[in-house]
Image: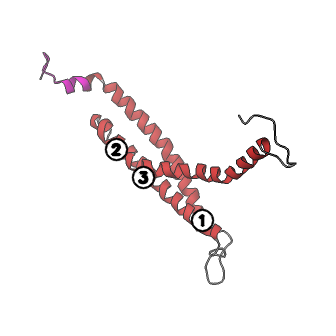
Amino acid sequence: MENNAKKTPAMVFSEEHEDLVRGGEKWMKETANSCTIAAALIATVVFAAAITVPGGNNAVGLPMFSKQIGFIIFAVSDAISLFTSTASLLMFLSILTSRYAEQDFLYSLPKRKGWILIPVAALACLPVILFDSLQFPLLVDVISSTYGPGIFGKQSDRPFF
């Protein structure tokens, strides 16, 4: 329905919130620009690490450490890093080149980041899980030596918690 000025509710809403759309566009562009720079730097470093083989090559042209597990882990993690940094770079560039219409803030822009959320969250948890798995035996030893019999065989009198 139209009001007395022959405007629909959507027209009134757009006129009243025009400054919010401009502010949102400015914020999105600044944020995407900062993230694009960071993603480009990460992609550059990861690409340089991918083409510079640690240890050099042998006479045949194969990497010296190609049979060692550490080299394989390095190559796989470098490939994953290159893929994710390139994907994020492309995502932020697509946000920068958006038209920033009023409808884009409601539908298009929020949906652009949804598909990558799960892989990024999983990759972000990977270092934490690795750190925890490496430090857990130390934690068990500390608790055992503090509240257990200790190295001299005497039971501790201290309460557990």
Q: In this picture, which residue range is highlighted in magenta?
A: 2-13
Disc marking residue 73: 1
Image position, residue 120 (x, y; %)? 48, 50
Q: Amino acid at mark 1?
A: Ile
Q: Locate residue 133 relative to residue 112 in the image: left or right.
A: right
**Mark 1 nearby-residue class (10 Å; few <14, some 14–19, many ≥20):** few
Number of the front mark, 3 or 2: 2
Mark 3 residue element: helix
Mark 2 is on which residue type? Lys
Residue occupying the far top of the picture: 4
Name the mark on residue 111. Answer: 2
Q: Amino acid at mark 3?
A: Leu
Please report the residue visible at 44 percent of the width from the left and 49 percent of the height from the top.
118
Q: Is residue 102 magenta?
A: no
Picture quadrant of residue 69: bottom right
Is residue 3 part of the magenta span, yes or no?
yes
Q: Helix, strand or loop at disc 1?
A: helix
Mark linked to residue 90: 3
Q: What residue sits 59% from the left and 51% below the top?
A: 129
| Residue lying at 60% horizontally and 62% vertically, measured from the top left | 49
- Identify the secondary structure beneath mark 2: helix
